[in-house]
Image (tube, rainbow, N blue to C red):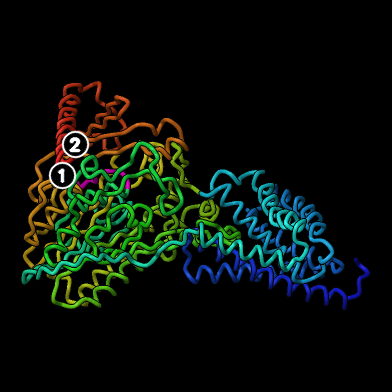
Amino acid sequence: MTGTHPVVRSHAALRGLLIGLGAGALWLGVEVALAWASGSVLPADVWMTIGTVDVVVGSTLGVVTGALAPALGAGRVAVAITGGWAFMRVFAPPGLGSEACLLVLGAGLVWGAARLIGRDHDRLFAALHTSALMAAGLLIGEVLLDSSHVGTLRGVALPVGVASLLALGPISDQALRLVLRSRPTRFAMQVTAAGLAMLLWGRPLAVAPYVDSVVTAVPPEPGLPDVFLVSLDTTRADHLSTYGYERDTSPNLTGFAQDARLYRWARSTAAWTLPGHASMMTGLFPSSHGAHLTGGFVGGESIDGRRNVAFPLAAEHTTLAELLRDRGYRTAAFVGNFSYLYRDYGLAQGFGLYDDAPGVLLRIRPPAVSAIRHFAPGFALKPFRTARQISELALGWLDTQPQDRPVFVFMNFMEPHQPWHAEAPFDEWARAVPGAHALARKNLYTHAAHDVDARTAAFIQANYDGQIAAMDEALGRFLAGLRARARYQNSLIVVTADHGELLGEHSEMGHMGRTLYEPLVRIPLVVKQPGPEGIRGVSDRPVQLVDVLPTVAQVVGAAVPEEVEGTSLESVTRPSFAEAGINPFLVSEYGPVYDRAMRVVYDGSRKLITTSRGERMLFDLASDPGEERNIAAAEPEQTERLLGLLEGRVKTTLASADAMRRVQ
């Protein structure tokens, strides 16, 4: 090839450029079509970036391949280009074993696929057809092998799997060639079949807000306050500067608390999204409202494609939105957590508008996404809409509402939820950790219990704190928006969380699983009463999410449903309780350590955790806030007393549930 005339090389490079441009456009077309059919959701700017990378990579590879190997036919050039596109799926700096393995396999693939193309391998149409087939084979095959994008395609399996999936398209096409010799006819048949398959079996996601057809004609009483409920998803109280944390993570919440009542010892009823929010909305504990883990898989899939593990909130329970709607309120919700606050899980009850669209939902993963993340780790990583987007939607909705009725707005912010990656300018704390960029490229989230080294733990906590700061900034903007619209002073505003997060304590990360330690259940709760005379200051009264609904009902003068187990925040006298069921997905993925249900009762500084295996863990939070010393054996009388409180509540709940079933 060293003696090839420069003009020939130039023509070959130009031909390669044209093939590469066409191939890149085809890859993007295949990705968009499969994303739509699989229920993926990507914003336009993300698609623009992916498309730009696809076209740039395709055209660059085309020019290089044409210049280096001008004698290659168009079909071989297209196969080489597509193999290079798939290389983005394997590439992981510094790039050694897997990449080299794919290159070796790719060389054989180019030879073999080019042989399969047949006599028309020099034609541009054949080249692009083959490229599209290879792209479809990789994307469809990977989804079938590894729908959650973890586990299957790793290690040596990654390059071998990618190369094998690339070959699926040309091989299937050649099998069809035994019946249909004409490539245009085969292409038309394949496109038609793909289109029909997507129409018949595709699952495009409905992202338009849910609109309830139930409208209450009851005129509201004069002077009813607007009600705003803000859920800071996955936010533990002890990482908020409002609650004494050393980093200034929540200056806007601190400022808001000057106008409000701050509850120092507020706790969730659960350690994950669905039961916590259901308790917030119904005033019931999880075993009463029923929106919790099943202990086994139930029918269907969640929105992100996993087998469903949770019961939705049953329609017979009265939600806060229904209670306020029936008082004449206009109701709207704007939620970031599309996983377990999605409309199918029952939390949309009573909302006239329920906006639960994902920010980014990758049911298929274009190779460009994997490659880009090595250089920009946050690219299309956080699947949830930002708190700023959520608050802007809520304020925009407020601007459309007439003044004749009060409003109830529920907002759910998701920044602190994993994946932990704080965006600029809130990444200052994370960037200060040595080796931050390398750590940012790793998937540090796992449910498997393991010790975390100090540097990794510092990086995770710094990102978590940065994400809280980003959320707090959006909260400040929303409150400023209410003030600008003269809707702040006379509103009831509740800011709380559904649960917290473990950040390495007890060798665990995340939430939803096998513990109910304090970082998971102790949450913020700040409540501003309407008008200038509302209750302010700090309360040490132990309260819970079940107390939100009766507090709102008291302020707006609504009757509290008889089934409600909470009480108005300033009247709480009962002990606090929390529950956790068995997640079958975690049991199947991480073993029997997750195969236990838990219940918790608090009384003063004492906290008792019991499990379905008969374990009892008693902690004195006053002297042991980290819950390191189980004193159940040393204090058997205290343990039995607390166990009696816990069993009394559970028995009462079960009796109430039995009575409800008999009525039905």
Element type where label 2 sits in the image:
strand
Image position of 427 (left or right of 65): left
Report if residue 268 lies within the magenta region.
yes
Callout 2 crowding tier (Cα within 10 Å): few <14, some 14–19, many ≥20: many
Q: Is residue 605 visible?
A: no
Report if residue 55 lies within the magenta region.
no
Could you say where residue 477 lies in the image, as x and y percent from the top left? 29, 70
Q: Nearer the viewer, residue 427 or 207?
A: 207
Of the residues shown, which amino acid type is indicated by label 1? Pro
Quadrant in the rendering for residue 290: top left
Could you say where residue 117 lies in the image, as x and y percent from the top left? 79, 61
Could you say where residue 317 lies in the image, as x and y percent from the top left? 19, 50
Which region of the structure is painted magenta? 265-272
Callout 1 crowding tier (Cα within 10 Å): few <14, some 14–19, many ≥20: many
Image position of 444 (left or right of 158): left
Element type where label 1 sits in the image:
loop
Q: Is residue 559 visible?
A: yes
Position of the N terminus by quadrant:
bottom right
Mark sitting on residue 77: none
* Total numbered labels placed on residues in the image: 2
Disc 1 and disc 2 in contact, CB within 8 angstroms? yes
**Distance (Cα) linking label 1 and label 2:** 9 Å
Image position of 325 (left or right of 249): left
Mark sitting on residue 542: 1
Q: Nearer the viewer, residue 248 or 318?
A: 318
Where does label 2 land, which residue? 602
For the stretch drawn in magenta, the main secondary structure is loop
